[in-house]
Image (cartoon, grey):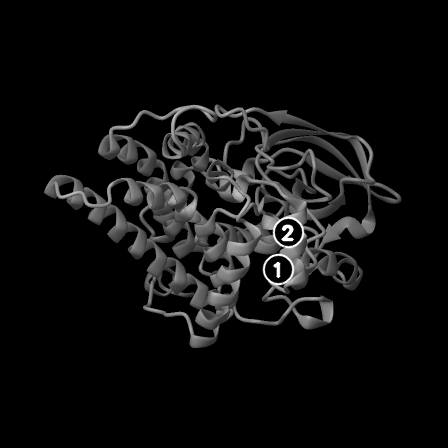
Amino acid sequence: MSSIADQLRFEPASLPPESEALREEVREFLNTELQDYSVIQRSHSWEAYDAEFSAKLGAKGWLGLTLPKEYGGQGRSAFDRYVVVEECLVAGAPTAFHWVADRQSGTLLTRYGSETQKKTIIPRITAGKACFAIGMSEPNSGSDLASLKTKAERTNSGWLVNGTKIWTSNAHRADYMIALFRTDPDPNKKHAGLSQFLIDLKQVKGITPRTIENLAGGKNFNEVAFVDVELPEEALIGVEGEGWRQVTEELALERSGPERYLSCFFLLRKLLDELRGEENPAILSKIGLQIAWAITLRNMSISIAAQLQAGENPTLAASVVKDLGCQFEQALPGLAQELCHLEPTLEGYGNSYQQILGNLIQIAPSFSLRGGTPEIMRGIIAKGMGIR
């Protein structure tokens, strides 16, 4: 059994020269492709949905970078993917269409999917032609995934699913969903009774997504109802009852990337522009602290990328990055308003900085939901450290 020190470590790591060389190519591409996007559009970043842009990234070979070449991937390093993601986030590129598929669904299918699933689905992911949703959270369960109740019961031809998922981003327009269902109702098998399924949302009947409007008027989240949904036997991913282990690995990918501290980075860039020439020591001190926090989170995130590159599963460390990154992101809009003395406004009013600030003040509270709430993250960390 590995020690806490083995699981919770952030050994210094740096991006190799070939990855940094890729950065310049990606940056040039983004400067060209995003020149007609407004700063308001860019402030939405990885919640902004643009299927055409995702297809262009796929055509460049920058989606599914780490996936095997035999399934349409590039077989490149986790560091290369880190660079592409980081540049897209800093530039405010619209990545929602391919985000989930590139970040975790493709990797999950590569590890546990059948040959048919791999050969059919992964090439669509790498081409930027497949939008994925994640069916994990449920009403009355919060982020405690192990307490979920949506059932997948065996039938003569496959599975019958009934239940509800919630906070499911882009379910109303996704092509596929990877969902976690309870396949064994035995109360003594809280974790062992879970399995994952690949669902073709364009073909399967009985699935109804209902969009949930956020404070900014956005409709990315969904509540998704499953009523007598019939899935074929081959929809099962991996082995029945192994869903919890698979999800744990998947969440390490979801919680450790640069998106955990760069969702508001476009605002930080604009804040620095607004404060250019500022000489007040108190303001400079607060800005310096924020930049130091961002640099620290980046170093931690790159360290996890190195662990992923080495084939490790840094679940505990990823939870730490997710928790600290969420604190950083949610604090930034308030700090920006404090330091700049410009009121946040709605889109169409005020200058671009005020509109960006207004947008992020409204959506930042939802950052706690993505990948697990702070309470759940701290519970995972405490348990992993043996203090709970």
- Furthest toward the left, the residue is 281
> Which image quadrant for residue 299?
bottom left
Residue at 69% in and 33% down: 172
> Which image quadrant for residue 353?
top left
Of the 4 image quadrants, the one containing the N terminus is bottom left
Residue 379 visible from this viewpoint: no
Residue at 40% in and 44% down: 266
- Furthest toward the bottom, the residue is 17
Q: Secondary structure at mark 2?
A: helix
Q: Is disc 2 in contact with disc 1, using a CB cutoff of under 8 Å?
A: yes
Q: Pick the residue in front: 67 or 342.
A: 342
Mark 2 residue type = Ser
Mark 1 residue type = Leu
Q: Pick the residue in front: 91 or 286.
A: 91
366 with respect to 238 (left or right)? left
Q: Position of residue 334 (x, y in %)?
A: 30, 32
> Which image quadrant for residue 175?
top right
Residue 37 visible from this viewpoint: yes
